Image (spheres, grey):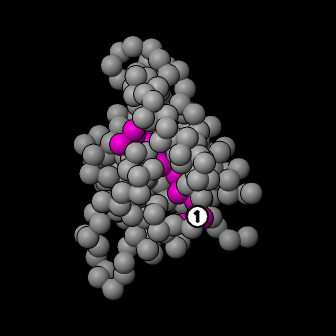
Amino acid sequence: MKQKRIILGVSGSIAAYKSADIIRKLLDERIYVSVIMTKEAEKFITPLTLESLSGERVYTDMFGGRDYQEIEHISLADMADLILIAPATANIIAKIAAGICDDLLTATVCAAKARVLFAPAMNENMYNNKIVRDNIAKLKNSGFKFIPCRRGKLACGKVGEGCLAQSTEIIKAVKSLLSS
């Protein structure tokens, strides 16, 4: 059986540090991981950390590729069996819902034929905002998949809905999509 390959998209949320655990758990399942980080994600966790854990180059820049013969957003999209965006911020959800391709992650999603799975993480007020909910509904209607946020302690100190799903739930959803 061919080893499954996924892209882990990491966007700019305090929950970005949890991407390290997600990488480890994916590798434990023998799922090959390529990471694309947004510039905002780099404010919360470094590419070096995720490179060290994944054992692979972490992609951060739309035009910063080392191999100029390759169009990275196309080659990354072509190799992926699944794209997991965890954490998925309100910003990244909105950009993808609107078809905006102004960074490597959004351009790769736009070019991909693979399924896309979002694991949102944001403040409860943002998660329940009508605009965010409409963007999620629009993406779901287009075939994109979502793992719901969970209730827990938010970065602001309050308890509410908006926490990134547990890593085990994310891996379970990834495996389910890869096997179907």
- In the rendered view, would you say 53 is above or below 91? below
Q: Residues within 10 Å of mark 1 (few under 14, many from 20)?
A: some
- In the rendered view, would you say 69 is above or below 157? below
In the image, residue 3 lies at what x, y percent?
Answer: 64, 67
The residue sitting at 62% across, 53% down in the picture is: 143
The residue sitting at 43% across, 28% down in the picture is: 129
Name the side, left or right, on which 5 lies relative to 180.
left
Q: How many labels does the image show?
A: 1
In the image, residue 75 lies at what x, y percent?
Answer: 45, 75
Looking at this view, is 116 or 30 the one in front?
A: 116
Give the quarter of the figure containing the N terminus.
bottom right
The residue sitting at 43% across, 23% down in the picture is: 124
In the image, residue 80 lies at what x, y percent?
Answer: 54, 66
Circle 1 residue? 114
- In the rendered view, would you say 120 is above or below 151? below
Quarter occupied by residue 90: top left
State the residue lying farthest toward the top: 158
User: Magenta stretch containing residue 88, yes or no?
Assistant: yes
The residues colored magenta run: 80-91
**Circle 1 sits in a helix, a strand or a loop, which is it?**
loop
Q: In the rendered image, is residue 123 in sight? A: yes
Q: Disc 1 marks which amino acid?
A: Ala
Looking at this view, is 34 or 141 the one in front?
A: 141
The residue sitting at 28% across, 76% down in the picture is: 66
Quarter occupied by residue 15: top left
Q: In the rendered image, is residue 18 in sight? A: no
Give the quarter of the figure containing the C terminus.
bottom right
In the image, residue 48 lies at what x, y percent?
Answer: 31, 54
Name the side, left or right, on which 158 lies relative to 65.
right
State the residue lying farthest toward the bottom: 69
